[in-house]
Structures are given as structure tokens and as C-alpha cells.
Image (cartoon, coloured by chain):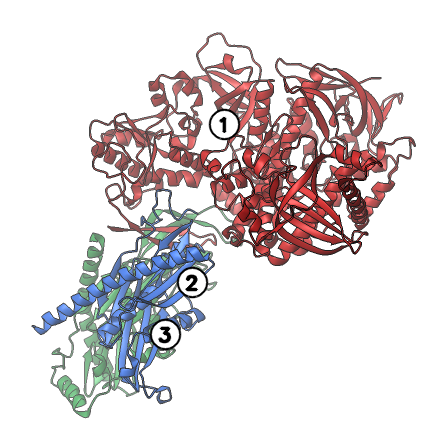
Amino acid sequence: MLQSNTFSRKTKAGRIKKEVREIYLRDDIYCGASACKTCLASTCRAPLDASSPLLILDTNVLLHQIDLLENPAIDNVVLLSVVLDEVKNKNMAHYNRIRALSTNPLRKFYVFSNQFHKETFVKRMDGETPNDYNDRAIRVATRWYQTHLGAATPVLLITNDRDNKRRASEEGISADTIQSYVKSLGQPELLDLLVHPAPESEDVTMEQIEDLRPSKKQVVYQEHKPMSEITLGLHRGIYHQGKLRVNRYNPFEAYVGSESIGDEIIIYGRQNMNRAFDGDIVAVELLPQDQWHEEKNLSIADEEDEEEDDVHLAPSSADDAPRTTNLVSGSATETNSTPSRHSGRIVGIIKRNWHSYCGSLEPMAMPAGTGSFTSALFVSKDRRIPKIRIQTRQLENLLDKRIIVAVDSWDRQSRYPSGHYVRVIGEIGDRDTESEVVLIENDINSRPFSAQVLACLPALPWSVSSEDVTNSIRLDLRSLCVFSVDPPGCKDIDDALHCTALPNGNYEVGVHIADVTNFVHPGTPLDDEASQRGTSVYLVERRIDMLPKPLTEDICSLRADVERLSFSVIWEMTPEAEIISTRFTKSVIKSCAALSYVEAQARMDDSRLMDPLTTDLRNMNALAKIMRQRRIDRGALTLASAEVKFQIDTETHDPLDIGMYQIREANQMVEEFMLAANVSVAKQIRDCFPSCSLLRRHPTPTREMLEPLLRTAAAVGLDLDVSSSKALADSLDRAVNILQRDDPYFNKLIRILATRCMTQAVYFCSGDLSPPEYHHYGLAAPLYTHFTSPIRRYADVIVHRLLAASLGIDKLPSVFQDRTQLTSIADNLNYRHRNAQMASRASVELHTIIYFRKRPTDTEARIVKIRSNGFIVFVPKYGIEGPVYLTTRGEKGSGEWYVDEQQQKIVKMDNSLSYSVLQTVRIHMEVVGPQPNRPKLQLTLIF
Amino acid sequence: MEYVSPEGLRLDGRRPMEMRQLRAEIGTVAKADGSAVFEMGNTKVIAAVYGPREVQNRSQQISDQALVRCEYSMANFSTGDRLRKPKGDRRSTEISLVIRQTMEACILTHLMPRSQIDIFVQVLQADGGTRSACINAATLALADAGIPMRDIVTSCSAGYLNSAPLLDLNYIEDSAGGPDVTVAILPKLDKVTLLQMDAKLPVDIFENVMGLAIEGCKAVSNYIKEVLLGNTKQLEYRRGL
Amino acid sequence: MVGLSVGEKHFIQGGIAQDLRSDGRKRLTYRPIYVETGVIPQAHGSARVRLGATDVIASVKAELGKPSALQSDKGKIAIYVDCSPTAAPVFEGRGGEELSTELSIALQRCLLGGKSGAGAGIDPSSLVVVEGKVCWDLYIDGLVISSDGNLLDALAAAIKAALSNTGIPKVDLAAETTGDEQPEVNISDEEFLQFDTSGIPVIVTLTRVGRHYIVDATSEEESQMSSAVSISVNRKGHICGLTKRGGAGLDPSIILDMISVAKHVSEQLTIKLDSEIAAAEASEEES
């Protein structure tokens, strides 16, 4: 049966177009009830249970109550395709979650394509709004289910649309609101999961919720402009569109990168942010220029609940570091700051980025009665998120817990957004709970691998087969003396090396990388999972693998004395480390030793040892040193970060000791050859596939980004040349403390400060950028990629496939023909990579607190930034950074101290005492608990 | 964009292997020697055949076979956006050529030396698959004109979207940017006479998609045979046989 | 294109002289007229008209545009005719262009009152959305699929039917605009703007063959004509446009005579056409 659907549509260019679409109506769409005799549903999934009540949900229920629906208490649900389409248009994230429910074999959710069913198709009537049309289609489908399944199966339409509910009742359909349905189930904890609709909406609301709201309503925020006005404003250039990014370290300051201005717009204060969340796509109106600067002071003074900075891990790049807006510049230094930065206010939100957040409830007194709804404020771990008001019946239970809360609405009368409770993670302060928080916060999938994924693994015990050895694409390198050098206890060994002296005096140097793509094939569940995870995540006490353990620790791991498959890069090098030829091949190797860095170093240093392995090591090290020097001469930066290492108690998993990570020559040697292999591979794949290679680039930092470094350096009389990476590298080499000669740590400190000014390197698809943009600033390499760690990075897996295709070993998977998909893979890798790093850092911070809980310590620290009420210090020994206050909170800059911006100094009014940047101070570190269950590390100055 | 829902339905309610509704009518242009309208869903084309007749331009005459010519044109109103220069663009010229070559292959041209056969196809509505619809219409018009043919030619297209081969793409599916394989076959002889594809496709998938398109051609040929049979019966009836 | 023998020519001319034409019609009788509306769903309005073996399609597409500076309170309407080669091999390539242009201009003149737009069948000011800024532009496309004479009358009838079939979505302004900016518009919910087509004239073409004139000539008859006069007449009997084709001169008195005959014939044609359009619309609703 054929029907056609005609409608008018406005195109992007503003033209109005008539669209005609055919609709083929079918009689082979089944009801999905397992016991249904009429529908011969043997071939498709029929999860519904016709003996218990069937629920049909309206769009508003799906859109608002997704957390409730994910609870197994709600089941036996029919999802109409008309409803799903509407959800998809309004909220893609919810759509995906609902789709996941409908394919979950444990849940009874069934999608019924009502629009294409001959008996439930509804033709749009003249003058009918889309909403009315959808509601009518829902009612028609509900009625069909009622008659189709007969009286034995009650069918209930659940809708919070008052009008739809009324009409349904008139038409003899049983309908109910989600609230009263949930109440009827008699499970009070489900009520917490309910989202309470915003009061201004037309939907049916629960009366008791209304009562809890303050009767006197004050308008806190400005109204959002209607969408049509925003579109027009954007069109005319009055408003600017962009993604809001809230400063991680100062939630009252946010930035909107605007393409229309070509610059960032700063938004100061919650008023101007006007209910926008981090990640929302917003429309911004610029403030008049004379308000650009004033706003800043206002924002600080105005918000009484600004929290003080916590002690945190020292940032390792500009991505982790606090933004560079200068909080020091008080009113006295107006002229000094940069009033040219655009500031604005948000007039509307184009797309919300609401999801669920981890955190805890703000401590509060228990109300008298129990069991009734209480209003509580939720504080997210992520400081960029404002407090969220929730209603709960289980306050007592939740107060000392980490919980997840989702945001529902934020109306202009309330200071905070309102949300609802989703679930409990565990007790605050508990290490496992906090670790899970870290994972959830960073969107890291730590679930065990599914059966489908594990089914892709080869049978165990696995060993190299004779076919592998005789395969013509594989070179048999088992006779070579191949060895690996890794941190102690490393189980996922993905690289090994060899170095053989050739008769002509040259060396053959090989880098052998685990041949992961021999086991992970494109399009398999295993590959999809790895692509999603993107990278392994290393926390202090555990590792979350990208690939299942049998692969990472056994089949792929290039362990000693077993034959393993590998992908090799083999160079012929002169003793001067000039590469004469490069060869790529798949191979079979047998590692003769898995060394730790310490062992390798010891062997090289021990002049008595003359065995072949040690000789090879020494030769390699000699080559690596030349290569390293050449790289530095080319302008590669020797950057430094303050990485720390914990010693973990094997029993309790508590940290026993903490210290800086020591870098040895052996580390640098391995690193050098990995870099060289990556560079060689990058050239090869980029030559073969100029438009679809996956490369890694490191953007050149702008002068503005380096500004804080320059200001600090200038304060200590150091002149840094940042005109190129070479110039910067040279001036870093020359950096010594002029004021204080015997300061061995000074150079490293400057390097650490330089590192944190730069952004991180990112993956990209070569077709998306032009060759000059491929440049890797930090390594001073025109082309770079990741090839050497396929066990723990998905980027390397992709690069392995590209390299194999470039050699004609394998054909190129079809993904590479789709550039948009490739770009989205690269974006995901960057996202996962960054999250993995954030998670590692958070994990270290967590363990730092646990460590210092029992060990108050006095130590040396360096001042890295001056603030109006004190300064920020960096503690080299523990790699952490945090504020030290000279004045008590609440009396900022009350006159006792003043800041000398030029000299980067904070000086006592009577000039008796002063602290300047980079100065060494002694501090006391102690974990204090100003609030129960919320321990924090406090730094105080020892005079 | 989701072109096939997880329930296995396309945007217009078809399943991946289903064709749109076909409709054909013979003898719509009274003055022509043979004519037909062919519809595949919302795609609607009209074909008229003039000839065999004297060659109009003597220099083009071929001494041992008939001259077959073809012109494809689209009505201004045939697309969603109104066309502004309807005639003689490169795309039209190319399709004209494709149709001519395809039809020439099945006409027994050696039986009609020094004569000319004109095939004109006019697209009234374009909703994907116009090439196929034009070839199907031209087959019917040639049959209506009584021009001797080896076999009828039928055509159908198939594409590949959301990792599923789809038969007979409509305009929205066609503009998704995926591959579109157009095939024409001589059903009785079981030969492929036209094969075109844009975009890229791995070979093994291409094989599936082409197989699907061929199945579509066979379905079209069954329908065309039915229409021709019905038409012949009607002619018989009118003659009082 | 019509190759006629001398005998055939005499037969046609003789039939006309005796008021019994070769297909059995009288001189002032039209062939049966068939109207079908909504044939092109993608257009805002469309109709197919068949007059014997003459078969034409007219479609109306509306696009948002900007009124011209001189007539800021009026929308624009344009008529384009295309002769498909399916109708006759001579239209192949650019062969139909001359005829197409001639027909387009004649229709523009007879239905829309030429360049000035005065006396147009539909009121162009009903197309204005915002004066001086936004208006609807109507593109009327005629396509000749099969031709057996009297294309102009058939096209005019098809255009009239297509316009009665036309529904344009109602639009409203998205937001207030100031100054010279082009305002944004939104589609309001599926409501349609329809035209009053009662004022659209019909065209009656009188073809002079020998000493007589006939209506609705077939292509054989047209091949014998000396000249033709097309007169558009609206429901009220007013003459809205007139165009003379063919080389031979006509006596002014004969022209006046022809006009009065055309006016008379148009009354029947209008009634017939209106009822056909109504029937076509009704059957379209049903399907």
C-alpha cells in the first residue's frame, strides 16, 4: 500500500521547498509480543510479555525520564518509531541510550515501526501541528495494541502531556502520567529517579513538588532569547555562536571560541553565563567595550561562594593548566592588563550538553521527618559544573556517598539548576569509590570485555604456527639477538630492539613492534571495542586495558624467550647514525632478554661485561646519543614534566612512598629509537596515502600562550627567545638563575614552566590539514605518528594497517575511504587520550592525598605564581602544586600585602617581607578535613 | 544519518531488498510511433519513439544498419528545485549516450538499413533512478513501435548505505553520497548491457550490490512483460479478434 | 512536419468550407477536453490537459524572492514553455526553442497582461509577504508532451487548472527587521495560500483556413492556415489579451467579427473547463 507524505521545509539557504516522500505501508511489522498468535514473529525478536501490562511511552517521558527507564523496574515497553524519531531530533544522547535498551536482551523493550504499519499509519490532517500529529499517531498505535492483543493484556499509555492524556481517556485508552505510574509500583526508591518537569511547562506536575518550591519567586537570570531571534541575530552578526568552555580552575569564568569574531569571548560570572553549562553551544552577545574590564572585578567580588583552589598535580601542558587570565591584576593595575579581550554575555543556548555528573551532596542538617522529599544541593567533582538541586527521599543514606546526578532543567527563577538522583557509587573518601569516580568523570569504559569481543581472540595457549613462519610476508628474524627494555614489571611489552654490526662497519638497527593487527581485524567486535576505548588507561593501582588481557600480556607481548609476531622497522645506519636505508616488514622474532631500564643501564655502565647483548646495548646507546643530539640541534625541545611515581603496598594498595620519576640514559635510548621508527613510518604512510593517513602534530604555541612563562622569566631577569622552537631550546639551555648562582633545579623548573605553556600533540587525518600544519613543534619533525605501542594505543593499530597496506601486505580497510569517519576516529582518539591522561592525573592526586593523610610533611617548594592573597607553590619532590595563603580567607588583598606586578612579587605593606616568583620557600603539608568526609591537602608556609 | 532503521526499514518503509512501486502505460503520445510512461515510485518518465523512418540528415546514414538516436531531457519542474537550464548540459548528454548505447545493443539494427530510429525520453519527475526508469520506458516505447529487438532491456539500480545493500535508491538515499550501481540486463539472454557506478566500494561488496541490482532488473522485466502482454491483449480485443 | 498530399489538403479545406471537419467537428467545436490535477506532486500546483491528441502539463512552483524596485508591492510571475521532443522530432535539440518562446510570450501577454502586469489573471500583490522585501515568485512551466495543434489554448487551460490546484505554504516573519536587511521567514503550520482563479481568462484561438475560421485546429488543419488570432477572454467577457500569428493580412472588420465569435465560444469553454477542473480536483482528493 502506498501513501505519500508531503510537507514544506525550509532549507539552510532560507528557501522554502516542497518535499514529497513516498511511504510504503506494510503488513509484516509484528507486535513483538512473544505469545502473539497473529504475528508470525519467529524470525525477529519478540521480547514483550503479553501476560503482563504493556507500556507505551510518549515522547516527553522518553526525553525526561531516561534514567528511570534504565532501571529494570520499568519493563515490557513498546517504543513507537514516531516517538523515537522525535527523541532523535531532540536529544541524540538519549536516543542512543534508548536504542541500547531496545537491543539489550535482558530488557523487554520493543521498537514498533508504527509509521509504516498499514493499520497504524496516520495521515497528517490539514492545519494539524506536528505535535498533535505525533500524539494522534501514538494514540492510534496504542489502540491498535489494545485490540490486537485483546483484553488479556492491559495496554497503558504513559504520557505527561496533559492534552494527550485527556484525549486518550476520551478515546477509551487507559493513560497515566509517569509519576502516578511509578507511585503505583510501590517502590519508593524509584521516585528519586523521577525527573520533575519545570514548572512553566504545560506538563502535569506533582503537587507535592510544587509545595516545596519557594513561594516567592525571584528572577535570577535573564530570559533566553527565542530560537528564531538567535538565528536572526547570528545571521546579522549581533550574536556569536560557539561552544562554552568553563575555566576548570575558576568556574565563574568561561570562554566561547567564536568563528565569527575569530577570537575567544570571555564570559565573566554566572549572571553572564546565564545558565549555560560547559560544552553547551551558546549564542553570545558582546558587552559594550567599556564594560569589558569592569566585569572582571565584579565577577570576583560578586560571587560569595567562590571556592578556594585545591592542591593539585602540577600541570604537564597548557591543556591541564589554569587559564592565563591574570587574577593578580587588581584594580590598581588596570592599565597593565589587556582590555582588548572581548567579553560578552550569553543570550541563548543552542544546544545543551547536559549529561550526568559525579559528586556528592552539600553537607546539611537532616530534616525532622524521614521518608518525605527533601531538597538538597549536589556539588559536582568537576568544578566547572554549578551546584545542582535535587529532591530525594533518602537524604540520610546519600549524605556521605559519591552519587551520580543528572540535570533536568534550569529556570530563570532558581539560582541552581534542578536535577535528579541517578545512582550511588560508594562512600566518599573510599579509594575504590574515588577511583571509580575518576573513571566515570573521564568517560572511561572499565567494564569487562563482552563475550563477543572475547570470542575474537585466538585460542589459548597460542604459539607461533609454522604457517606464520613460512608466510611469505613474514621475515624470520628469530636468529637475531632481539631484546626489550621497559619499566620494571611491565607485562604488555610492545616494542623490542636489535642492533647488529655489519661487515661494512655500519649497523643494522631494528625496532620490532608487536603485530597486533594480526589478531585485531577491522570490523570485528574486538576492533570496534578497541577503537572506542582508544587507549589503555593507567591509574596508580590498576590498568584499564584497551585490548583483552590474553592479547596484551601474552599473545602480543614480546616477552623473553618466546616466539612472537612483530612488525619491524629496520635501518642500516652508519656509526654516525645516518640512516642509509629503511625497511618495513612483518616478522617473527624471539626476544632473548626483557630488561628493565635499571638492568639495561647497569649492564651498560658495568665495564666488565663484554657479552654480545651488552655490546649491542652500548652500540645502540652510542647511536641514540648522536640521534638525540641531532634532534636537539634541529630544534627539538627538551621539555620536562614533574612525573611522580608511587610505591604501592601490594596488600592494601595504599601508597608507601612517592617520588619523582627518574629518567636514565636507557630510557632515552629506547625513546630515541621509538621516535625514529615513528618518523620513518609517518613518512612511508603519508607518501602512500597522502589524504587518509593518521598523523600526530604538535601545534606551535602562540606568543600569547607563552606569555606567563615570559613574564615569570622577566621577573627573575631571564630573557627567553621564543621566536622558534630552536631559539627557545637554546635559550632554555642557557637558563640559569642569575640571582642565586647555586640553584641546580632552576633550569628544570623553567623547562617545567615552559612545558605547561604548550598544548598537547593531537592526532589528525592528513586529508584535513595542509602539509605545513602537520609539523610537530616539540620534536621539530615535519611528520610524526604513533606506531610503536599498538597494544595500548588504537592510533598505532590504525597506523599498522596503513603501513601494511602501503607495503601491499593487506588491503586498506574501507574506513580509510571515508574521510569523515576517519576524522571522527581521530577526534575520538584525542578525546580518549586526553581523558586517559586526566584520569591518570586524578588518580595520582587521589593517592597523594591518601599518602599524606598519615604523613604530615615539611618540604621545599618553589613559588610559581603570585596571587593577591598569597602565591601558588610547586613542590618538586611530589610533583604537586597548590596555594599558600598569606591572608586568611575573606579578606583578600585587605591592605596588608600588595602585589608588584612588574617584579612578580607580593610585598608586605611595611616592606618587611616579600615573596617573589621562583623563590624557594619551606612549606608544611598536611591533610585536613574542614568538612566531614572531604579531606584535602593544605599547604602552609613555615617562616 | 540512519538510512536503514535497526528494525530493517528504510526511510520510506521499504525493506532493503524491496523495489518501489512500478507503473507503466503504453501509448501515451498519440503522434509517436511508439510511446510509454514508466514510473518507479515518484520517478516518472515518458518515452517516445519515432521510426524506423527515413534518415533526416543524409550524411549520418549507415548503409547496413539503422541509425539509432536518443535525446534525454528533464522538465523544468521535474526536480525539487526548479531547473533553470534544462537542455543540453553534460549530464543530459551523457545519459542520452548511455540510453542510446544500451538500446542500440538490443535493437536488430541490421534489419533496417538506411533508416533512423529516434528515442526521446522526457523526465517528468525525478526521485532517484532516472537512468533506470528511462531505459525501462524506452524498452516499452520501442516494443510499442514494433521495432525488432533481441530481447527487452530492463534496468534497476542498487546502492550501499549503512553497511546494507539497498535496491532501487530514491532521491534522498541517492544523495547520501554512497555508491549507486545502475545495471541494465537482457533478461532472456542473461547478459548485462549497462553497468555504472559512482563512489567507491570494496570488490566483495560490489559483487553483492550488483547481484541485487540484477535481481531488481529481473523483477522489472517480469513486470514489463506483463504490461506488454496486457497491451497486446487489449489490441487484439480492439481489433475484435 | 505534416506532409499532406494535394488531395488531402483539398479535403481538409473543403470540409472546413462545408462546416464538417475531417474529424466530424463543426468549425466552432472544441475537441473533448480532459483535465487531471496534481500530476506533479513536487510542484506547488500542476495539471495535465489533453485536447484530442494534444497533451500538455503545466506546473506552478513558488520560490521566495525579492520584489523588483519598481513594483515593490507585487510578486513576480513568469511563464516558460518547453516543447518536449517526445511531441515531435523537430523539437529535438534546440529545435523547439522558437516555438517555445513564441508560446511563452503569447501566454505571458494573454494571461498576465504582458510587462506591465495590468489586467493579469491573478493579482500579483497577493504574492507579497513583506512589501519591498519578500515576495513569492511564481514560476509557471508548461511542457508539451504530445502535439496535435492548438497548443496555446491547451497550455492556457492547463495553466489555469494548475493555478487552481496551487497551494503555497503560509509564511510569517521570524523576527522584526530593521533597515535594509533581508528578513527571515518561517513556515507556519501547513496552512496554504490559495489563489482565486476565477479571473484567469481562457484563450480561444481562431485559425483562418481559406475564407473561414475554425477553433481548436489540429496540426493538419494548422498546416493549411493563413493566419490565426488568439484572444484571451475572462469570465466577465472582457478581452484580456490578443495576439495575431501567421503572415496573411486580415481585414479589421473580420478581426472584430472574430473577437465577438471568440467571446461567444469562450463562454462555453470556460464553463466546460471549470467543471473539468472541479471534477479533477475532486478525484484527486479521493485518491
Colour blue, chain: B
Look at chain C in the picture and name its colour: green
The numbered mark 1 sits on a residue in which chain?
A
Q: Are marks 2 and 1 on the same chain?
A: no
Task: Tell me the distance, in whole angstroms, between the alpha carbons under discs 2 and 1.
Answer: 48 Å
Drawn side of residue A846 relative to residue A912, left or right:
left
Nearer to us of marks 3 and 1 is: 3
**Which residue position holds label 3?**
B101
Q: Residue at x 50, y 13 (%)?
A: A397
Residue most extreme to the top: A368
The x, y position of residue A25, in whole percent, is 27, 47
The residue closer to the viewer here, A401 or A829, is A829
Q: How many neighbours does mark 3 have within 10 angstroms: few (below 14), some (14-19), or many (20 or more)? A: some
Residue type at numbered disc 2: Met
- Residue A617, image x, y percentages: 77, 41
State the red chain: A
What's the distance in space between the residues labelled 3 and 1, CA to CA?
A: 64 Å
Q: Is residue A335 left or right of residue A45?
A: right
Residue in view at x 38 percent, y 47 percent: B4
Q: Is residue A660 above or below residue C242?
A: above
Tell which subunit mark 3 falls on. B
Q: Which residue is mark 1?
A: A406
Secondary-structure class at tag 3: helix
Classify residue A70 by image quadrant. Answer: top left
Q: Give the quarter of the figure containing the N terminus of chain C.
A: bottom left
Locate residue A165, reporting x and y percent.
30, 29
